[in-house]
């Protein structure tokens, strides 16, 4: 999967992340959807994004990832 494809998905969802967060999401998304080591990860993600069911699954994964990320940040802030 190309980061450019991920960035276009995030932009379509109205989400902006810094480079570190984008990289982290990129790696977790590859693992979750079993795309690690695929011959053409970029095309596989683009094809999945075009399918309504897979698109919803990708969106839900990204939203859940953002919620987990937000909770971790809140926990860190409250500890300090």
Image: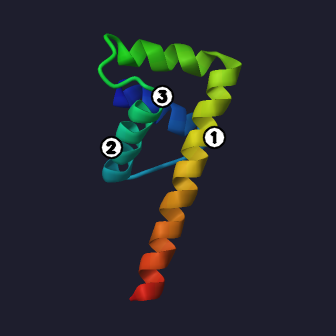
Alpha carbons under labels 3 and 1: distance apart? 12 Å
Alpha carbons under labels 2 and 3: distance apart? 16 Å
Name the residue nearer the viewer: 30 or 2: 30
Which quadrant: the C terminus?
bottom left
Alpha carbons under labels 1 and 2: distance apart? 18 Å
Q: Which residue is mark 2?
A: 23
Residue 3 pos. (x, y %): 36, 31
Q: Residues within 10 Å of mark 1 (few under 14, many from 20)?
A: few
Residue at (32%, 48%) from the top-left corner? 19
Name the residue nearer the viewer: 30 or 3: 30
Query: Judging from the image, what secondary structure is the residue with disc 3 in?
Result: loop
Q: Which mark is residue 60?
A: 1
Query: Judging from the image, what secondary structure is the residue with disc 2 in?
Result: helix
Q: Mark 2 or 3 closer to N-term?
A: 2
Q: Which mark is residue 33?
A: 3
Residue at (43%, 12%) from the top-left corner? 43
Colouring rule applied to residues: rainbow
Report the side of 21 relative to 11 (left or right): left
Marks 1/2 in contact by CB < 8 Å: the verdict is no
Up-down relation of residue 2 to residue 77 (above or below): above
Residue at (43%, 25%) from the top-left corner? 34
Name the residue nearer the viewer: 19 or 59: 59
Up-down relation of residue 39 to residue 70 (above or below): above
Q: Mark 1 or 2 closer to N-term?
A: 2
Report the side of 69 relative to 37 (left or right): right
Q: Mark 3 or 1 closer to N-term?
A: 3
Residue at (46%, 34%) from the top-left corner? 32
Front of the two marks 1 and 2: 1
Query: Judging from the image, what secondary structure is the residue with disc 1 in?
Result: helix
């Amino acid at each position: 999967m190309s980061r450019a494809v991920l960035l276009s998905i995030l932009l379509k969802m109205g989400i902006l992340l810094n480079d570190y967060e984008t990289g982290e999401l990129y790696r977790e998304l590859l693992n979750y959807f079993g795309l690690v080591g695929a011959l053409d990860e970029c095309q596989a993600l683009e094809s999945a994004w075009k399918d309504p069911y897979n698109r919803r699954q990708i969106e839900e994964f990204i939203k859940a990832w953002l919620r987990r990320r937000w909770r971790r940040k809140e926990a860190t802030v409250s500890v300090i």
